[in-house]
Image: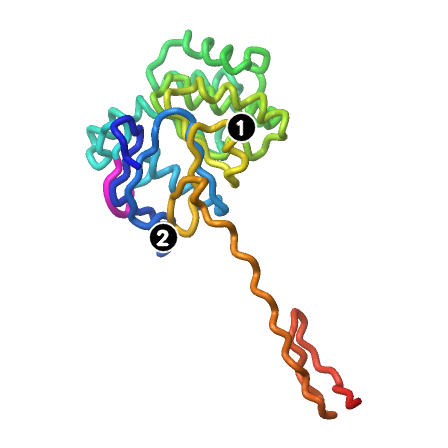
């Protein structure tokens, strides 16, 4: 559903991965607050999130983020200062200390050094500021990535798989911090069950459609195997099954 308060508006939006549709052309709106997008295929979730974050061009239709049509370069330039994006992996940052990583992001966004101190404190990273990013445990590495992605206080943040590598206790500690990152935060995860307890809205990307979690279809049950009668004569015959082999039929 598209409403006036939708932070992201798609009209006939289509996303492809090579020759395959990730999202067939469809229209929808993502509201403000904490929004979750789940789906069984990680690459599909990644492609959709990158498109919504304006890092990839849609293959069909129109996309508006924060009221701006992303088809124009002027809109994209304006959106770069209003969007935060956290990729699932940032191997290039492994040699940075946490402070240097966040400082670089602040410099790129033309923010003062005071914003670096503020975001490190908000994400409880003061004690880890001098640590190399690549040597951090998973929970602190996610927090450092969030600090760099949102040091400029964006209006909307797109976070790719921030909970995937965390244990249950670490997820519970991180979730309350996500709501304070931006007025709208879009998070991806492998399953809707990870998101439903704390997101305001949850959608599922399945079979090239994006639907509310309550409307997602249950996975189909595997088809029952048909048992075929074996021939009742004394020649060799082929037994069908996971391992195909020949055996001798017996005559009662």
Q: Which residue is mark 1?
A: 94
The residue range painted magenta reads 58-63
Q: Looking at the image, is mark 2 or mark 1 nearer the viewer?
A: 2
**Quadrant containing the C terminus in the rendered view:** bottom right
User: First in sequence: mark 2 or mark 1?
Assistant: 2
Compared across the picture, whether 69 is left or right of 105 comes to left
Disc 2 and disc 1: Cα gap in Å? Answer: 34 Å
- Whether the magenta-drawn stretch holds residue 229 is answered as no
Q: Which residue is mark 2?
A: 21
Q: Quadrant of residue 35?
A: top left
- Whether the magenta-drawn stretch holds residue 62 is answered as yes
Colour setup of the view: rainbow
Taking 5 as reference, is 223 above or below it?
Answer: below
**Residue 202 image point, x, y percent:** 44, 35
Taking 228 as reference, is 147 above or below it?
Answer: above
Mark 2 Cα-neighbour bin, 10 Å: few <14, some 14–19, many ≥20? some
Mark 1 Cα-neighbour bin, 10 Å: few <14, some 14–19, many ≥20? some
**Residue drawn at (34%, 29%), measured in percent from left and top?**
31
Assign a secondary structure to mark 2: strand
């Amino acid at each position: 559903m598209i409403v006036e308060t939708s932070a992201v508006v798609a009209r006939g939006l289509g996303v492809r991965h090579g020759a395959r549709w990730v999202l067939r052309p469809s229209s929808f709106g993502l509201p403000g607050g904490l929004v979750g997008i789940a789906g069984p295929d990680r690459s599909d979730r990644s492609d959709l999130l990158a498109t919504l974050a304006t890092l990839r061009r849609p293959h069909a239709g129109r996309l508006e983020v924060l009221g701006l049509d992303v088809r124009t370069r002027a809109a994209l330039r304006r959106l770069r200062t209003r969007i935060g994006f956290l990729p699932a992996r940032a191997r290039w940052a492994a040699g940075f200390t946490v402070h240097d990583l966040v400082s670089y992001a602040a410099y790129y966004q033309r923010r003062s050094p005071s914003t670096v101190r503020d975001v490190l404190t908000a994400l409880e990273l003061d004690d880890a500021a001098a640590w190399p990013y690549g040597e951090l445990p998973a929970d602190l590495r996610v927090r450092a990535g969030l600090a760099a992605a949102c040091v400029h206080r964006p209006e909307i943040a797109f976070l790719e798989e921030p909970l995937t590598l965390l244990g249950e206790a670490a997820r519970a500690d991180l979730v309350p911090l996500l709501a304070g990152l931006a007025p709208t935060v879009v998070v991806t995860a492998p399953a809707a069950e990870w998101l439903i307890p704390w997101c305001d809205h949850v959608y599922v990307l399945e079979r090239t459609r994006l639907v509310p979690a309550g409307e997602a279809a249950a996975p189909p049950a595997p088809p029952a195997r048909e048992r075929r009668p074996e021939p009742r004569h004394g020649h060799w015959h082929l037994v069908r099954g996971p391992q195909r082999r020949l055996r001798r039929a017996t005559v009662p």
